Every structure is written in C-alpha cells, then in structure tokens.
Image: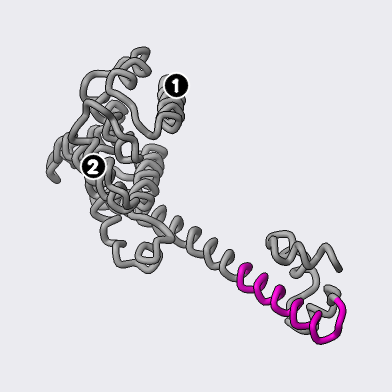
C-alpha cells in the first residue's frame, strides 16, 4: 500500500512538472523520476501511455506524442480506454472452464487466486460498461464510459469480497461450487455499482440545474420588482412573487454570485 501511495505521489509530481514545461517531458526525465520504483519496462511503458492520455507530450516517445497532440478530450479518453483494453487483454483471456477452476480454488481457500479471479472478470466489466454507450447520462456527458468502467471494477471487488466472506454458501451439498451463484453475485455487484454511480451523478446534475434555474428566476424577479416598485425587494417579497420558500431563497443566495449581490442589498 505504501508503495502504491508513493507511486501516486510521484505521478502527481511528474504531472506538476510537466505543467511547468508546457505539458512536455522527455523519456529520460520520467525514467529519472521513476528510478526509485521497482518497475520493469512494461510498467514504465504503461506510465508513458497514462501520461500521454492525460495530454502530456513525451519527447522520444514518438507514437505517444502524436496521439497527445489530439486536442479533443474525447479523443484522449478513447485512447485511454483503448490502452486499458489492451492492458486487460495482455493479462490473458480466460475461458469459462479456466474461470470456474479459479473460482473453485478460491472457494476452497486459496487466496492467491483472488487477483486472478479479478483479472478474469475485467473484460466482462468493459463489456457491461460498453452497454451504457447510448444511456442519456453518457450521451449528454454527465458521466463517461471510463468512469463507468472504474465503478464497475469497484463493484467487481465488492462482489468478490462478498463471496470471500462466506465461501461455504457458494458450495453445493455435493461439494462442487455453485458457479452460477458466484457469477450472479459478481455480476450483480458490478451492475449495481455502475447504476448507483450513474444515478448519483445524474441526480447531482439535476440538483445543480434546478438550483441554477431558481437562481436565475430570483435574479430576474429581483430586477423586475425593483423596476416595478422602485426599491429592492425583500426575501419575503421575492418568495411571494416566485413561490420559492424564504429559507430556500437564503440557501440559493449562498450558491449564486448573482443573487449574492441582490442579497447584500436586502
């Protein structure tokens, strides 16, 4: 865990340094910053690709630099997802027989198979996330497929933890694993994590939009009443005119710069 935290700190430092250098770094600079980590060439390559997907140009890394020149964020997101899929594929595809073998060993107490079980399901998470491509929350850019994949991976880990907490429940009377139940629990937790995330982000956006709409209404109402009556309206007058409760008006005024200016005169 400490090594992971240190790695994240180093990545943050690298990105900060890149920002001071017009989002440009050399391979040599990056390698120097990573010199304290026990990284092989494959992991360093993954770091290059991660930085490039974030819009950083790496001199000496021609293929990545060309992609980094893409100006559209959606192009970088697509590249990032493509790289992730490639990394998942490198783990090696597992057929149903091999996956069931992993599940059986895990249920029998072999915790060393936990990571392999996670890896065997990563491609499934991507497949499920791709099914949300036409969802309104995705098309209107409230959430991205990358975010849904990330939440799905969290759900995957939750599902495996649920199974790990009571392994005997997933072993039938004949001593064989209940593979259908295991796959079902994992799938349910993945989908639940994705759906919960989308619902949360969507409701958050709806709330923000509602607050903005009411703030605009209050601003326009204040202007109208000021012109109509010759004096700046009170909160109570705004409430009577807009039908927005006084307490809610106070909250909205705390969120809107426009209505803050109105409030300062009330």
Tell me what residue is drawn at x 45 percent, y 30 percent. 20
Q: Assign the magenta stretch its main secondary structure.
A: helix
Please tell me in which quadrant of the rendered image residue 8 appears.
top left
181 displayed left or right of 89:
right
| Nearer to the camera, 173 or 183 | 183
Tell me what residue is drawn at x 36 percent, y 62 percent. 138
Which element is circle 2 on?
A: helix
Quadrant (top left/top right/bottom left/bottom right) for the N terminus = top left
Which element is circle 1 on?
A: helix
Instruction: Give the alpha-carbon distance from disc 2 to disc 1, as whole Å.
Output: 28 Å
Q: Position of residue 76 (x, y in %)?
A: 30, 47
Q: Earlier in the sequence, mark 2 or mark 1?
A: 1
Q: Position of residue 73 (x, y in %)?
A: 34, 51
Q: Which residue is mark 1?
A: 6
Mark 2 or 1, closer to the camera:
2
> How is this picture coloured?
one colour
Label at residue 67: 2
Tell me what residue is drawn at x 26 percent, y 57 percent. 130
Q: Dot 1 surroundings within 10 Å: few (below 14), some, or many (20 or more)?
A: few
In magenta segment, residue 229 = yes
| Nearer to the camera, 159 or 107 | 159
Q: Position of residue 114 (x, y in %)?
A: 30, 32
Label at residue 35: none
In magenta segment, residue 222 = yes
- In the image, the segment drawn in magenta is 211-231
Q: Is residue 57 in view? A: yes
Relative to 204, is 239 above or below?
below
């Amino acid at each position: 865990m400490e090594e992971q935290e240190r790695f994240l700190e180093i990545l943050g430092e690298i990105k900060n340094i890149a920002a001071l250098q017009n989002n440009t770094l050399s391979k040599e600079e990056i390698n120097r910053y990573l010199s304290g980590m026990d990284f092989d060439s494959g992991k360093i390559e993954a770091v290059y690709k991660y930085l490039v997907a974030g819009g950083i140009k790496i001199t000496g890394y021609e293929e990545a630099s060309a992609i980094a020149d893409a100006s559209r964020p959606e192009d970088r997101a697509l590249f990032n997802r493509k790289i992730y899929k490639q990394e998942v594929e490198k783990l090696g595809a597992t057929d149903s027989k091999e996956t069931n073998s992993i599940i059986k060993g895990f249920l029998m107490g072999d915790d060393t198979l936990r990571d392999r079980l996670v890896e065997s399901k990563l491609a499934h998470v991507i497949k499920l996330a791709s099914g949300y491509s036409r969802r309104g929350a995705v098309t209107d850019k409230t959430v991205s497929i990358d975010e849904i994949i990330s939440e799905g991976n969290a759900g995957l880990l939750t599902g495996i933890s649920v199974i790990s907490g009571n392994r005997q429940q997933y072993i039938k009377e004949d001593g064989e694993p209940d593979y259908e139940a295991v796959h079902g629990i994992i799938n349910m937790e993945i989908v639940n994590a994705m759906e919960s995330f989308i619902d949360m982000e969507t409701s958050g956006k709806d709330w923000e939009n509602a607050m903005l709409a009411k703030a605009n209404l209050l601003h326009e109402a204040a202007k109208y009443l000021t012109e109509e009556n010759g004096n700046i309206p009170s909160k109570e007058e705004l409430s009577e005119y807009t039908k927005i409760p006084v307490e809610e008006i106070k909250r909205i005024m705390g969120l809107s710069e426009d209505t803050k200016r109105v409030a300062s005169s009330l």
